[in-house]
Amino acid sequence: MDGQLDISGEHLQLSGVFNSRPQIEPRACSVTLEDVTWDATTKRYTATVVIGEKQDQVMLAFIGTGGGTKQLSVLLPGYTQNDHFTKEWLALLEKFVLFRNMDWGSTNGNPIVNWNDRITPEFPTYLNGPIGQTGIPYEVMVDLANTVGRDLWICVPHQANDDYVHNLAQLIKQNLKPSLNVYIEYSNEVWNWGFSQATWNLNAAVASVNAGDPFKLNYDNCNNKWYWGYRRVALRLKQITDEFASVWGQEAINTRVRPVLAGQVVQPLIAQLGLDYINAVYGPPKKWFHSIAGAPYFNLGDLNNNPTMTKDQVLDAMQQSINSMSPSIGVGGTNYLAGHVSLARWYGLDVRGYEGGPDTFGPNGIQAKSDASLDPRMKDLVIQYLNNWYSYGFGPLNWFVAGADSYNSQYGTWAITDDIRNLTVPKVLGIDAVRTSPPPPLTVGLAVPTTLNATEFVGHRVPIVDPYLRYLSNNSDFSYIIRANNPGNYKFTVYTSGTSSAPLIIDVNNVGNRQKLTTPTTGGDENFQPNTPVTFPLDKGINVLRLFVEANRAYTIQKIEITQ
């Protein structure tokens, strides 16, 4: 579990209980046994495993055990059987406020349905469960959370039934320290067609609709199977939340139990489809969901296709990618994080990063990528990257991978370090600098009082071609992110033009206070006149304004003035 931990020259302490004295065969070079003892009465076997030079793993074969092996432990010097995790790894994890167990739980493609088929701590290996699956038991995940004193993030397998979820809720409630929280996510990247759970979920959604649509996945008659699939993710998370509520109590939902609706960071529509569905069919999503989440990786762009890339080119490409995530670029179509701000604030949810960090996956430039990961510039890139994230007002981001792994392969330089004993590498130093500093100020959206150009709604075309918002369709809506340094009541004045009066809805923060305007007749498409001002309270920080069109092409919108 500790990546590149070098065990050359170590003397490991082997202990175990066997039905009969085993024959132990080292399956690695330069591995020998010393101080061997066998107690026929207790059936306990002990030995010192001596690791030769240039070894980073040890493999032992136990033969002739009489059909039984119990209480087996192979410990580094300085550890006891009560120590379940290395000191180096715990020192690293203490830098984080939570950790996600997606890979530990072998979430992707996990075939498990029933609770009784799961891997438990007593299994001799976590690489071959009752139905051939792999994964670390939940008990070990909870043990790690309790040991390091950090919140737990669990990914529920995509086929797990309600009984499985109920038992999982009981296990965590009984074992997780009361001071800690648990984040609950349905599977992993169910939108990603590279994973079998995405296809499985889509087929399940289609089957549900074809069976009479009992869950109203096609509630709006969209007849779009892809939309049904995204909605089913939200449905299943709601069902999982209900099971946890039956065990923990409703008061624990969104306090200690924190369900997370994860989507694709560059497609806010995926999360929106799920939230809009829950809102329309069941009620406000915040009753079931704590957060939405995405994975805002920074990457190399087209440089990743260049086999002759240099270290400096890698760092420059990463810089460009991180720059593209800054709130300073506005809220247009390329700023997908702004879309998550608007969506989460509208529904009263937080935003989390289920994964993040550098995406350097690919066979080209392996040495350049490795060198860049250890270059001092990487520290500043990490600082800017994380400060960008937090300047949107988002919550914690899970670094992928929060451990050690080699940087010298085509599979990327995801890991926070390449040696678990070395926590002075640039990525760790960058994370340390951010976590020990005050949070950056919110910079997304426009500070009020202000005047909004109506075309500068979240996700607008870049660059803006039309100076006005016109040719509008009935039932369309437009969102705007605004920041209030001083909370209080503000006046909103919308400037419109049109040849006849028509209704226009305005709302702020979706708190049940929307108001209807009757736009004035101005006699021309660009003869703009102010509507009667309406007043809304603004909270300190981020707020979201939405305009809802209720008349097809009846008016053109120029701007919205916001004054106190």
Image: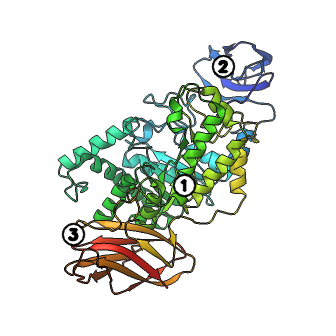
- Residue drawn at (50%, 31%), measured in percent from left and top? 134
Is the residue marked by circle 3 packed among few (<14), some (14-19), or many (20+) residues within 10 Å? some
| Helix, strand or loop for disc 2 | loop
Q: CA distance from mark 2 to mark 3?
A: 72 Å
Residue closer to the observer: 335 or 496:
496
Residue type, numbered disc 1:
Val
Q: Could you tell me if residue 513 is visible in this image?
A: no
Callout 3 secondary element? loop
* Closer-to-camera residue (127/23): 127
For marks 3 and 1, the one nearer the N-term is 1
Disc with the residue nearer the chain's start (1 vs 2): 2
Closer to the camera, 391 or 233?
391
Inspect the image, locate mark 3, and give the three-letter code of the amino acid beneath it.
Arg
Q: Secondary structure at mark 1?
A: strand
Residue 317 seen in the current view:
yes
Q: Dot 2 surroundings within 10 Å: few (below 14), some, or many (20 or more)?
A: few
In-image side of 52 versus 461 (left or right): right
Residue labelled with disc 3? 553
Q: What's the residue at 81%, 16% (across, down)?
A: 34
What is the x, y in percent for residue 409? 60, 26
Q: Which residue is mark 2?
A: 59
Q: In terms of sequence position, does the residue under pointer 2 or pointer 3 come before the other? A: 2
Question: Label 1 crowding class (10 Å Cα cut-off): few <14, some 14-19, many 20+?
Answer: many
Label 1 belongs to which residue?
A: 182
Vertical relation: 501 (above or below) 417: below
User: In the depicted view, which residue is nearer to us: 260 or 400?
Assistant: 400
Rendered location of residue 358, percent (x, y): 58, 41
